[in-house]
Amino acid sequence: MRLRTLRPLLPAMLILSGCTSLQTATTPATDWDARRASLLQQPNWSLTGRVAIRTVDGEGGQARLSWTQSGEATQLQLAGPFGAGRVDLSVTPVAVTLQTGDGQAVRYAGPEAAEQFMDEQLGWSFPVRSARYWMLGLLDPAAPGERLFDDAGGLTALRQHGWDISLNRYATVDSLLLPTRLTLENPQLRLKTAISNWAIAELN
């Protein structure tokens, strides 16, 4: 099932506007392997912020972003000003469910549900399951990838699945170093993310 109004809805949600340039901070030196081990033991987290999207065709804009990760389950919400064009996306290992603000819904099932959804509904190829690691500044441990460091030993970028992930700024949250400015880019799509709030849930 295709939501015929979903693609036209995205420009309304991603309201084009001028945005303040994000300043790049020097990547802090740290024990990146120890950091990776600590973060991989934190399966439950959430973030809020903004995302700017630009396609190879020059289309794009900005939206508010809310991301909640509960183990293997991902909950994403994108919305324009005052909730305009809100989209809620739920991703599990076996299904994807999308709900729009006007009540439209679509569901894909199967192990390739996320990829099928992205291709058919948005025309984008985006590895949602790997992106849950990228947002933490980690490579997806289930796939080959590359970490890039600056001369001071700071982790500045990741490469995986044909994507370049630039880690432009960090903040310390509950003693964990987390990205607050990221750019995810491939030849078809660029997403610039500014994270304003991180929350890490404690394991019971």
Image: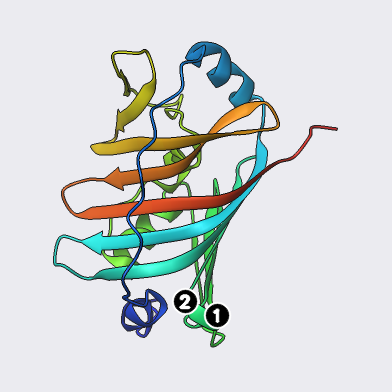
Q: Is residue 70 visible?
A: no
| Number of numbered tags placed on the structure image | 2
Location of residue 159 in the rendering, given as x and y in whole percent from the top left corner? 29, 30
Q: Secondary structure at mark 2?
A: loop
Q: Who is closer to the viewer here, 140 or 164?
A: 164
Q: Please give the name of the residue rendered at 51% of the width and 83% of the height, measured from the top-left corner.
A: 104
Image disc number at residue 185: none
Q: Secondary structure at mark 1?
A: helix
Neighbour tally class for label 1: few under 14, some 14-19, many 20 plus, Cα within 10 Å:
few
Residue named by callout 1? 83
Whole-percent x and y of residue 151?
28, 13
Q: Quadrant of the C terminus?
A: top right
Nearer the observer, 139 or 107: 139
Please tell me which residue is depicted at 26% across the width and 46% down the height of the picture.
Answer: 185
* Residue 110 horizontal side relative to residue 166, left or right: right
Q: Is residue 22 above or below residue 50?
A: above
Check contact, mark 2 vs mark 1: CB within 8 A.
yes
Residue at image point 47% right, 76% down: 80
- Where residue 42 sits: x, y (%)? 67, 31
For residue 192, above or below residue 4? above
| Residue 132 shows in this picture | yes
Question: Which quarter of the figure is the N terminus placed in?
Answer: bottom left
Q: Could you say where residue 25 lies in the image, as x and y percent from the top left?
A: 39, 35
Q: Which residue is mark 2?
A: 80
